Image: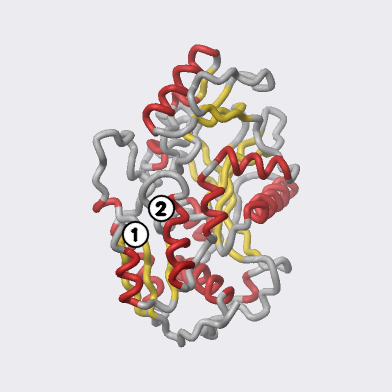
Amino acid sequence: MAKHPGSFPWRIALTANIKDNFVKSADSPPDAGAEFDSRRTVETIADAMRADGHTVTICEADRALPIVLDKLQPDIVFNIAEGLGHDSREAHVPALCALLGIPYTASAVMANTISLDKAHTKRIWRSFGLPTPRFQEFRTGDERVSRALRFPLFVKPANEGTGMGIGPDSIVSDARQLRRQIQHVIHTYHQPALVEEFMSGREFTVGFIGNRGSAESRRNSALYNGSGYHIFPVLEIDTEDIETEGVYGVAAKSIDVRADDAPGYLCPADIPVMMYDRLGDLTIRAAEAIGTRDVSRVDFRLDEDGVPHLLEINTLPGLNREQSDLCIMAAAEGMPYETLITEILYLAAERYGMQIPVAA
């Protein structure tokens, strides 16, 4: 890839969908917009890059974005935009940047498209021999249920994030509950329902930054392992005693992590070293299977025998300083928030051949 001419410090466009600016349509689900970022989160990310000397302009990822980027001519885009619309929405900004020839952070068009399609992601993982619960996708709700599926089952929208469409009713124990929840998802979220076998064990999430390859030329080269990745401490999500009855959905995720009724965020998780290594290995294999870049987070659940299964991958993990899982992991190991943000920025810049400043 040809080197980008931008010289340090850079003009950075921070692309985001800001929750305060989102207007629901008449047929929007009740939790529509939950995946968007608060203005405070966006400003905090911008401040982290400004502190490193850059000029940062916050750009709303709406229909005007092509004109805004063309006028701004940024050296690089720091993208956290979830996108507007339905299919492939998380790929909107990456596709636009690719069209305009602007470097950008995190995964490319294909990986963002795949990761939002949970059923397709699981098909790819299965083709790589990676463990994921047995599943079936329902587009009309009238499909015959696969004989391979065993109750209890878990029902969720096939193309949502941030726990949208997930609550106590997502766990179903018989055919009547299953059909009712499938129809609820299809009609409320206007997309297929993904049904998978419910894993009854502990829930974990594992985040990482990095790209495969040598880290010798990176700003903080010692941060990365021999494969080019930095895997954060495993975070366990303890939902046993919360009001959402053991389900880590949008309601549970929206509770302030410091509140008494919030899920337990246990990091580092209290698990054997062998399980740490297993989850880390599966995380990188799952990410590489769909071609992620720079940063991602992978969710797991253990089955009744304690075997980890891949649930889904987030190629645009949240970066809310206090609330987001990835930030909780980074803080648990003592990584400053500013370092997390700038490492994502410089990992992307490295891929484009931009000159990386030496660490202070």
Q: Residues within 10 Å of mark 2 (few under 14, many from 20)?
A: many
| CB under 8 Å between discs 1 and 2 | yes
Residue 16 lies in quadrant = bottom left
Q: Nearer the viewer, residue 352 or 286?
A: 352
Asked whether, in this view, residue 219 is left or right of residue 9, the answer is right
Measured as percent of width and height from the top left, residue 159 is found at: 48, 40
Taking the spot 68% from the left edge, 28% from the top edge, the residue there is 304
Residue 328 makes an appearance in the image: no
**Amino acid at dot 2:** Glu
Residue 312 — which label?
none
Q: Residues within 10 Å of mark 1 (few under 14, many from 20)?
A: many
- Which residue is under mark 2? 82
Quarter of the image where the N terminus is located: bottom right
**Amino acid at dot 1:** Ala
Measured as percent of width and height from the top left, residue 248 is found at: 47, 36
- Which residue is under mark 1? 61
